[in-house]
Image (cartoon, grey):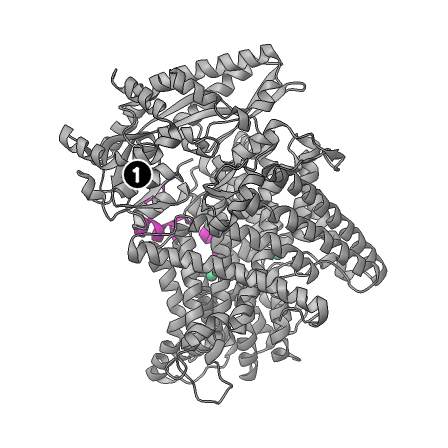
């Protein structure tokens, strides 16, 4: 618990604290703040949606009821549609390309882009690249036609599955395992961490390693709160967030690989794509870009593609 | 059945009828939307993507709209074991105290509801932690008319509000201030009904604010079956 | 310490005659304003999100609606007739049939009081006519009525699932065997008492009557097949199952049983079907009976959700003050094992059940005990069933017990007389509670068989 006179920083998130990349990072952040800023500030982490879910937390942040959170990037589409770039299929070759883009001018500018609406990004936290799974083998894009996929609420993700002639279905995350198991929906897209952590692979025919999208989080705070901090406190906090971000992001490839291996060890089927197969998926999903070019800006797409070329 | 303790004529009757109809229609809509989505998904591999969110919002509307009606009809559940053994005098006193607490509760909820909703409607929150002491000075981030819901599309016939609420920019989805408006409205109605109910106790027209269990009405309908030993 | 004060304040307010919902909400609000820097706006947000942000809880209005369409006198009468045809010829047959009818009605209804009212009003009268004492009849029904929340569908299970993020479908499946077991234990007890006291038995009416009455009741009972079959068969989620059940119940009540709506006729008149009046397919949606049923279900939903929403505000206080961690820490430090822990849970719930509406109690207690249970290796589904059975028993223990009230109203008896009358059967339910608490596979076997082992992701 916090001591008298310390500034309380509430960090609310929706995952577990010991196995999920976000939960691990949030706990590390808490430990460092409480050790290094002892007497000045004190962080309390509220995991597992015990305080707010991802949608509520941003409202609460604007009202000053919570100071930090790390919702997935698509949650920020309501603040500025630029964030739709992260949901566009095959925009990034791999998580290293994502990382480089986020570190680039375009990516750093996006962290500031919501300031006029009261939010400030402090750092991107990786989860990993998204894979596609269903209750039948997915080798070609045509295999997904006619299937029902659970999607996160996002216009881009809906369009992505519509491009496959599949049916996007919104569904609370807590219902997904049961829905996949009984067949209410046929498939889903997620990172290895989530596919293993939520045991989705147990109730799917297999997972196709498409790496077609990215699931990342943005650590945010409210501009009003942030601007009200003492200069020194703000800088120290910012430094800690940046260091935790770099440390955990560097470890995430390993976490991702471990989760993938754990799926294999548990008997989950993983389908790798050869170049031709992969190109077929790219061709099927690419038309989605056009629909959202105005939202995300051609210059950002160009920047992302320029970075891809280096990987 | 509903409303047997109130006259069903005149203005009061009309208001009862209106509130009951709204409650029935909202629940009916929730059921139909959910059912249609099952049929669309299972039978036709498609669905109303906004159905889930719309049903959830209607659920909030059902309850927030209905709580004040249930105060009027003394339908909220409570523990009457202690109250019932008291003689009329102390019982009336307890009723008034309970009424005052309900009024205080509804008052705090109304202030909270206004503070929560107002920025979404580009209006000022109240200042003060417990009591509204004034109106905030609107800052840059106090204008949240742009904040949209997740899935429900913006209805075309409402386009005229864009210049007023969103600097003339197009809404893609329904702005949040529309569904959220039920919060201040419902809370204010609740406050109003609690004041009325407390006045009824004051005037000796009512005994309390609660009913001891949900089946009270239904029991009255069947009680005659088992009279005597 | 603060928390003790908080709970004392809540209970005090309730005893004053403040509505349960307001007692929870008012005390919590005061505590948030005094102890934390949480704003009133945040409390309003919690209130709104209690409905809009808890997708699982949406099942509550739908199950209540389905139950309302099915709670017309006609359905209860058909179920009772079928029960008597099956078991009426045993010693104590009508009482056994009453339990059996309660079990079947529980499969249509998510609440216990509704079960007592629907079945009790008819069965108690019937039992008295053939020579049972009123006390015996009331004691049987008060106890059997509690099965309403154990046999799926169950509002209390929906609330537990929502509070702990376990699957509603799993909880429903987990309730099936305990529900059948509790019903069987009650029926066997009645049979034994009936043999000793030589209670009346009906003549056997033959398989024809079983078939005839069974076919008639089957339309209603098919609801449970739709719910469990639909969830397990991958047609819909549990929440959607509730909505489908409501639509099904509407169709059956209007067009098959014709207990309501445009095809309803006065007693003795010839039955009309859709063929005589096809326009009824349209008019049924706008019929006054439909509106009234929607409204009554809506009203019950509102009063329950008012309590749950305010219980969620209390949960917000507890989370904000990090009480669950403190409680878990204290209990684990004290070295409590699973057995002692479950005893404590039982005691908390039995006491809490004196004051609280069951769903509100679950919202408050589940987050407190759930983390500890996981730590101690107790299966979340098993814990859920234990909590539900505790709620059941809370309903028939004095001084405050929902089913005691309802039964006393239905039977026209004083509460104390109902308490005395239900004591022998209450003892049976206590034995049952101990069984369910310490033999986990009674609860977990069926869900594990049909849906695979429980997955704990926390
Ligand atoms: Na039930
Ligand atoms: Na009790």
Give percent across and percent down for residue B203: 84, 61
Give the residue drawn at x 40%, y 57%. C241
Determine whether, in the image, residue C7 is placed left or right of residue A72.
right
User: A304 or C23: nearer the eye?
Assistant: A304
Q: Name the quarter where the N terminus of chain C is drawn.
A: top right
Per the rendered image, the range of residues in magenta is C431-456
SS at badge 1: helix
Dot 1: chain letter: A
Determine whether, in the image, residue A130 is placed left or right of residue A296.
left
C285 is higher (above) or lower (below) than A58: below
Give percent across and percent down for residue C389: 50, 54
Asked if residue C436 lies in the magenta stretch, the reply is yes
B50 is higher (above) or lower (below) than C319: below
Determine whether, in the image, residue A271 is placed left or right of residue A233.
left
Give percent across and percent down for residue A45: 52, 27
User: C134 or C165: nearer the eye?
Assistant: C165
Asked if residue A67 lies in the magenta stretch, the reply is no
Residue A124, quarter of the rendered image: top left
Label 1 Cα crowd, 10 Å radius (few <14 / some 14-19 / many 20+): many
Main SS type for the magenta part? helix
Q: Name the quarter where the C terminus of chain C is drawn.
A: top left
Give the residue drawn at x 34%, y 38%. A157
Give the residue drawn at x 60%, y 23%. A224
Give the residue drawn at x 34%, y 31%. A293
User: B74 or C384: nearer the eye?
Assistant: B74
Can residue B60 be spotted in the picture? yes
Give percent across and percent down for residue A203: 28, 43
Mark 1, residue position: A160
User: C432 or A16: nearer the eye?
Assistant: A16
Determine whether, in the image, residue C338 is placed left or right of residue C402.
left
Residue projecting furthest to the right: B89
> How many numbered badges does the structure rendering display?
1
């Amino acid at each position: 618990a916090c001591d008298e006179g310390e500034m309380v920083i509430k960090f609310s998130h929706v995952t577990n604290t010991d196995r999920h990349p976000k939960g691990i990072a949030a706990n590390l952040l808490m430990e460092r703040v409480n050790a290094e800023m002892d007497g000045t500030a004190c962080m309390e982490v509220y995991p597992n949606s015990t305080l707010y879910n991802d949608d509520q937390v941003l409202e609460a942040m604007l009202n000053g009821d919570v100071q930090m959170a790390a919702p997935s990037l698509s949650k920020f589409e309501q603040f500025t549609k630029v964030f739709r770039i992260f949901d566009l299929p095959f925009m990034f070759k791999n998580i290293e390309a994502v990382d480089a883009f986020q570190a680039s001018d375009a990516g750093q500018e996006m962290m500031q882009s919501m300031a006029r609406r009261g939010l400030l990004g402090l750092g991107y936290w990786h989860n990993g690249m998204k894979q596609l799974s269903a209750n039948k083998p997915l080798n070609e894009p045509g295999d997904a036609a006619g299937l029902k996929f659970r999607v996160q609420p996002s216009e881009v993700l809906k369009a992505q599955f519509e491009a496959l002639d599949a049916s996007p279905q919104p569904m609370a995350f807590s219902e997904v395992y049961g829905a996949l198991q009984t067949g209410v929906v046929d498939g889903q897209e997620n990172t290895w961490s989530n596919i293993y952590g939520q045991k989705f692979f147990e109730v799917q025919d297999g997972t196709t390693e498409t790496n077609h999208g990215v699931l990342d989080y943005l650590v945010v705070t409210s501009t009003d709160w942030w601007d009200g901090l003492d200069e020194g406190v703000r800088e120290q906090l910012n430094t800690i967030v940046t260091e935790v971000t770099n440390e955990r992001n560097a470890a995430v490839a390993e976490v991702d690989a471990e989760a993938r291996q754990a799926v294999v060890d548990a008997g989950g089927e993983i389908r790798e794509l050869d170049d031709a197969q992969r190109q077929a998926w790219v061709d099927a999903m690419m038309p989605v870009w056009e629909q959202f070019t105005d939202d995300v800006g051609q210059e950002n797409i160009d920047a992302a593609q320029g970075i891809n070329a280096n990987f | 059945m509903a409303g047997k303790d109130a006259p069903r004529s005149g203005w009061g009757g009309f208001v009862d009828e209106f509130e009951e109809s709204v409650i029935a229609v909202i629940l009916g809509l929730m059921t139909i939307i959910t059912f249609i989505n099952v049929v669309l998904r299972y039978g036709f591999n498609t669905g109303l993507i906004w159905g889930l969110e719309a049903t959830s919002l209607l659920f909030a509307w059902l309850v927030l709209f209905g709580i004040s009606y249930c105060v009027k009809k003394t339908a909220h559940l409570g523990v009457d074991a202690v109250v019932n053994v008291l003689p009329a005098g102390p019982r009336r006193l307890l009723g008034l105290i309970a009424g005052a607490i309900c009024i205080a509760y509804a008052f705090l909820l109304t202030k909270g509801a206004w503070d929560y909703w107002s920025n979404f409607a580009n209006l000022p929150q109240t200042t003060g932690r417990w009591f509204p002491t004034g109106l905030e000075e609107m800052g840059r981030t106090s204008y949240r008319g742009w904040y949209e819901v997740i899935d429900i599309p913006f209805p075309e016939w409402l386009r005229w509000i864009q210049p007023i609420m969103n600097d003339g920019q197009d809404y893609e989805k329904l702005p949040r201030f529309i569904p959220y408006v039920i919060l201040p409205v419902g809370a204010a109605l609740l406050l109003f009904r609690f004041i009325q109910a407390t006045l009824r106790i004051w005037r000796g027209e009512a005994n309390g604010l609660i009913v001891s269990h949900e089946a009270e009405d239904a029991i009255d309908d069947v009680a005659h079956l088992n009279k005597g030993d | 310490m603060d928390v003790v004060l908080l709970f004392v304040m809540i209970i005090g307010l309730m005893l004053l005659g403040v509505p349960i919902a307001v007692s929870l909400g008012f005390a919590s609000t005061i505590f948030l304003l005094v102890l934390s820097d949480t704003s009133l706006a945040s409390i309003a947000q919690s209130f709104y999100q209690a409905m809009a942000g808890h997708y699982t809880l949406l099942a509550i209005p739908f199950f209540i609606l389905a139950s309302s369409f099915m709670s017309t006198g006609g359905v209860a009468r058909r179920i009772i007739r079928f029960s008597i045809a099956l078991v009426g010829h045993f010693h104590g047959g009508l009482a056994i049939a009453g339990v059996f009818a309660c079990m079947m009605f529980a499969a249509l209804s998510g609440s216990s009081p509704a079960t007592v009212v629907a079945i009790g009003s008819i069965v108690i009268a019937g039992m008295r006519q053939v020579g049972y004492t009123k006390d015996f009849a009331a004691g049987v029904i008060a106890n059997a009525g509690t099965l309403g929340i154990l046999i799926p569908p169950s509002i209390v299970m929906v609330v537990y699932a929502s509070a702990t993020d376990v699957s509603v479908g799993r909880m429903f499946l987990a309730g099936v065997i305990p529900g059948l077991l509790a019903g069987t234990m009650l029926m066997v007890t009645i049979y034994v008492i009936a043999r000793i006291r030589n209670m009346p038995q009906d003549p056997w009416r033959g398989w024809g009557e079983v078939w005839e009455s069974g076919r008639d009741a089957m339309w209603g009972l098919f609801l449970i097949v739709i719910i469990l079959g639909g969830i397990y068969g991958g047609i819909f989620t549990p929440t959607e199952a509730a909505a489908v059940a409501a639509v099904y119940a509407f169709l059956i009540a209007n067009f098959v049983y014709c207990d309501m709506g445009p095809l309803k006729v006065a007693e003795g008149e010839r039955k009309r079907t859709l063929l005589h009046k096809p326009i009824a397919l349209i008019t049924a949606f706008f019929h006054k009976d439909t509106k009234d049923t929607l409204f009554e279900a809506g009203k019950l939903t509102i009063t329950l959700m008012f309590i749950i929403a305010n219980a969620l505000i209390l949960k917000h206080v507890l989370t904000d003050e990090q009480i669950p961690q403190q409680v878990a820490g204290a209990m684990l430090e004290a070295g409590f094992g699973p057995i002692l822990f479950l005893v404590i849970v039982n005691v908390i719930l039995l006491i809490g059940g004196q004051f609280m509406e069951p769903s509100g109690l679950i919202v408050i207690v589940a987050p407190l005990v759930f983390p500890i249970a996981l730590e101690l290796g107790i299966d979340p589904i098993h814990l859920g069933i234990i909590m539900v059975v505790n709620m059941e028993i809370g309903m028939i223990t004095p001084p405050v017990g929902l089913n005691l009230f309802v039964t006393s109203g239905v039977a026209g008896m004083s509460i104390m007389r109902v308490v005395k009358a239900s004591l022998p059967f209450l003892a049976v339910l206590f034995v049952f509670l101990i069984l369910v608490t310490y033999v986990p596979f009674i609860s977990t076997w069926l869900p594990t068989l049909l849906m695979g082992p429980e997955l704990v992701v926390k």
